[in-house]
């Protein structure tokens, strides 16, 4: 594996002396790691990636100092990642190819960001959320935990473009946004909701609702959708799907009770 | 031409000793060719490309062995291609820039895959098919021969996302899918059919049908569409267009008869 | 800043001896500058970029000579730009990451081209126009001055794909095209018009009109849209927004009068 050998730094990689690398970090060919980047133990950086990409101020301000970028442990970034200075990722985060993440973005542990995703900065992506390929997350978006967003979805932020108003979209935990939906600035997608493919969502979506169309209208409850596989309810998906989720093998209910019990025990200490 | 000189391997390219290169292969600057890649005679690999990208198993399994990637003869990949181990391309295939092709994909001879296409693996793309820029082909898709797919089209594969069901889209020969259409998991697009721009197709499309809208509905037969140029029928396109096609100069009918005669002669031997 | 130090050429950059670099040009790591490229004073080229990418003819014609690419002064191209031979940019142009610009394209001064934009060649983009991320500009498109185009918009050019007809879209000055709209071949978007998110526009849009839907229909005049901020009219945007525009601080009207007076004085000379 000549371009990326696990546990090694490729000799063609260009790494600032001011970067701090954990143990067992792997860095592929032609990577660039700028000043003030911290990479957690066991993280793998695919070839042609750039970490700590300088902000726009670098090009205008001689006194520019690259803000810190903190990459968690055991992240796996496939080839061509560009991550700006001033962001953070948790542990176990995975990127597809050619992902772009701008500044002031916080990506939670075990999130997955697909090939060609474009995260515009000043965002939060919660733990275990899954962005498929080519998802565009506008500035100021807040994406909860365990959210699924499918290819070519765009979360926008300007209600009357161009303007100086910046209203990020909020996507609550467990929501699902299907392929090529557009969510208009300031809209909130409720917990467990489902946005259909190609929808254009210009008002809030209630929890557990299904919306479809341009503009999107409410079709009903997610609980009315039957599985093509067995005719049983398919949603909320967390009750029927566990691959890669922390409740894998035990079910969402049991896991959720354990989680709440643990939180209560902690609070009682 | 300092970054890519025809017939030469750029000195900055990183090429596994276990790769096999045909005669007259050209490899541009900063390319990476991993283990177990075979490149056919006369193929050109643009700068910054990666061939034989390791599968996810590489990062978890010490005994990982890169599966073979076989690139045909006289392929032309523009800069920034990423092609995984475990796929194959025929002869005369062309890629635009920054194409991503994952594992277990079979791309037929003379197919063209446009800039920023994202082919997710476990797919087939037939000979002479044309994917314009930014086409997303979900896993398990089967695209026939002489199919045209325009920018930002997505072929999906999960009928109730997220789930463990994976129903690929099937696109039959000579079908055309216009810009930004979404095709829902498991749908079949019939031979010679035409899917309109921005359509969301959630049920099968009959051969020679035109469908438009969100969700898509049948508008009529492709044979009713008149050319803007001369008022003659414009479809099936194979009867009216030949640029780059094997029937160029002789017409589809004559070529088709020759092809059938040749097949029959072969079968009679 | 190890991968891109201002005012310097990175030692890993591969630069043709036939390229002409102005004073104070910065070139990042792993860049390729082909023959016959001219770069204006003070321009910054981010890492992994390619300027003067050869046209398709290079691969077929031994006598191929790279046509000139002229990059203006004080351009800022973020990492991963690919710009073909045979195009030009004005002064003060900015690119996001991984922008692709093909041949015979003219980009006006102070235009901004966002991350992952794909400009297919034989196009014009006017001064101060803003293309957000992932905008696809088909061949033969003509985009005026001060135009805003938002993510995942596609300007197409073939009215009956596939065909040999190529009718570019025309977007007049000050028009706005919102996220994921598709504009069909040959359509003209009028001055100050507004195309809504997810619209599919298959006929001309009058100046100052708002259109929405699939297919798009006229909703009214842009002058009827009130600002979410203050209830005042929000459009034409040039009367209410000035960030980064040449009328910043003085207002559109005053600037426009100055501009006309200057033009008249010049004409009277």
Image (cartoon, coloured by chain):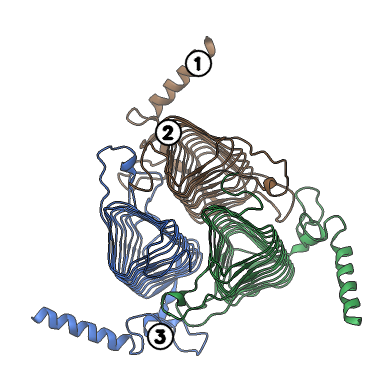
Chain colours: A green, B brown, C blue
| Distance from the alpha carbon under mark 3 to that under mark 2 | 55 Å
Q: Residue C65, located in which quarter of the rendered image? A: top left
Q: Secondary structure at mark 2?
A: loop
Q: Which mark is residue B264?
A: 1
Give the image location of residue B99, x and y in percent: 50, 48
Name the chain under label 3: C
Where B113 falls versus C172 (above or below)? above
Residue matched to label 2: B74
- In the picture, measured across the screen, residue C46 lies left or right of residue C246, that is right
Name the chain under label 1: B
Mark 3 closeness class: few <14, some 14–19, many ≥20 residues within 10 Å: some
Q: Residue B160, located in which quarter of the rendered image? A: bottom right
Give the image location of residue C40, x and y in percent: 28, 66
- In the picture, measured across the screen, residue C99 lies left or right of residue B59, that is left
Give the image location of residue A51, x and y in percent: 56, 64
From this viewpoint, is residue A224 visible? yes
């Amino acid at each position: 594996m000549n371009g990326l050998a696990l546990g090694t730094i490729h000799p063609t990689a260009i790494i600032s002396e001011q970067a701090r690398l954990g143990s067992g970090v792997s860095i592929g060919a032609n990577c660039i790691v700028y000043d003030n980047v911290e990479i957690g133990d066991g993280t793998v950086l695919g070839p042609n990636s750039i970490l700590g990409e300088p902000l726009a101020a670098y090009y205008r301000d001689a006194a520019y100092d690259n803000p810190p970028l903190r990459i968690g442990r055991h992240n796996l970034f496939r080839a061509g990642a560009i991550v700006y200075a001033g962001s953070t990722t948790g542990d176990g985060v995975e990127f597809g190819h050619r992902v772009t993440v701008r500044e002031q973005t916080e990506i939670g542990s075990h999130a997955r960001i697909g090939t060609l995703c474009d995260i515009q900065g000043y965002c939060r992506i919660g733990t275990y959320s899954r962005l498929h390929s080519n998802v565009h997350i506008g500035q100021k978006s807040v994406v909860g935990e365990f959210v699924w967003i499918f290819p070519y979805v765009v979360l926008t932020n300007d209600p009357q473009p161009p303007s100086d108003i910046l209203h990020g979209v909020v996507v609550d935990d467990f929501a699902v946004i299907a392929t090529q939906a557009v969510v208009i600035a300031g809209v909130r997608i409720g917990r467990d909701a489902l946005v259909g493919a190609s929808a254009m969502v210009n008002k809030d979506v209630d929890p557990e609702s299904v919306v479809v169309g341009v503009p999107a209208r409410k079709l009903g409850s997610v609980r009315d959708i039957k599985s093509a596989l067995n005719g049983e309810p398919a949603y909320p998906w967390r009750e029927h799907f566990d691959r890669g989720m922390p409740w894998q093998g035990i079910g969402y209910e049991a896991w959720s009770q354990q989680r709440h019990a643990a939180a209560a025990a902690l609070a009682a200490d």
